[in-house]
Amino acid sequence: MTATRALLTCFALVGAALLAGCDDTAGSRLGGSVYETYNLTFNTIKIKKQVVGGTFQAMIVEYVNDSGGCANACEIPVKVVINAPVSGGEKKDLAKDGAVTRVMKDNSQFPDLDKGNITFHDLPDVGGDASGEFYATFVGGTTLNGEFSGTVQLLGN
């Protein structure tokens, strides 16, 4: 191996290690035809268990874009909410028991949800790592799907 090639290989390995250590989205992605109309850029996943008055209310998955800082508020290009009860391995109907929205500075919103579902493959208690996937079809036929993985945080009391 030449010295130049060895140096390039070293830089590539170091760069890959640095990126892997900084990635808050490992195992998470978004897809679907909504990409043609909406900005879905995200760099952080937040999975929240909403508890009100000690009662489990909902699970919330947020694909957050916090690049450039969040002086006033971060943008959330995709926010998926599913009402309790929710358990690991169970497919839940988003149109009946949930919502797919976004929180953007330009106030853009998805069309009304026609149908969809969400499944948490793993759903541990707060502090554990959860993963899953969702599929949504909006009125008019545009689609959005995603996979997510992250640590469950508590929202509420």
Image (cartoon, rainbow, N blue to C red):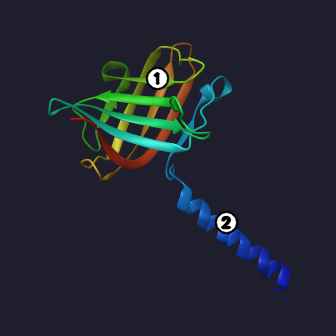
**Quadrant of residue 118 within the rendered picture:** top left
Determine which residue is flagged by label 1. 101
Q: Nearer the viewer, residue 92 or 39?
A: 39
Residue at the (58%, 31%) spot, across then down: 32
Q: Residues within 10 Å of mark 1 (few under 14, many from 20)?
A: some
Looking at the picture, how far across and down is residue 26, in whole percent? Answer: 51, 53
Determine which residue is flagged by label 2. 15
Query: Which residue lies most toward the front here?
Result: 71
Q: From the viewer's perspective, tell me whether residue 116 is left or right of residue 22.
A: left
Check the image and report above or below for 41 versus 97: below
Q: Give the residue type at disc 1.
A: Thr
**Quadrant of residue 75 within the rendered picture:** top right
Q: From the viewer's perspective, tell me whether residue 49 is left or right of residue 95.
A: left
Residue at the (15%, 29%) spot, across then down: 53
**Quadrant of residue 133 within the rendered picture:** top left
Q: From the viewer's perspective, tell me whether residue 6 is left or right of residue 150.
A: right
Q: Distance between the residues labelled 1 and 2?
A: 35 Å
Looking at the picture, how far across and down is residue 105, in whole percent? Answer: 57, 22
Q: What element carries label 2?
A: helix
Q: How crowded is mark 2: few (under 14 residues within 10 Å), some or many (20 or more)?
A: few
Going from N to C along the chain, the mark reached first, 1 or 2, is 2
Residue at the (47%, 26%) spot, across then down: 136
Q: Give the residue type at disc 2.
A: Gly
Q: Is mark 1 on a helix, strand or loop?
A: strand
Q: Nearer the viewer, residue 139 or 151?
A: 151
Looking at the picture, how far across and down is residue 9, in whole percent? Answer: 74, 75
Q: In which quadrant will I find the C terminus?
A: top left
Check the image and report above or below for 12 versus 105: below
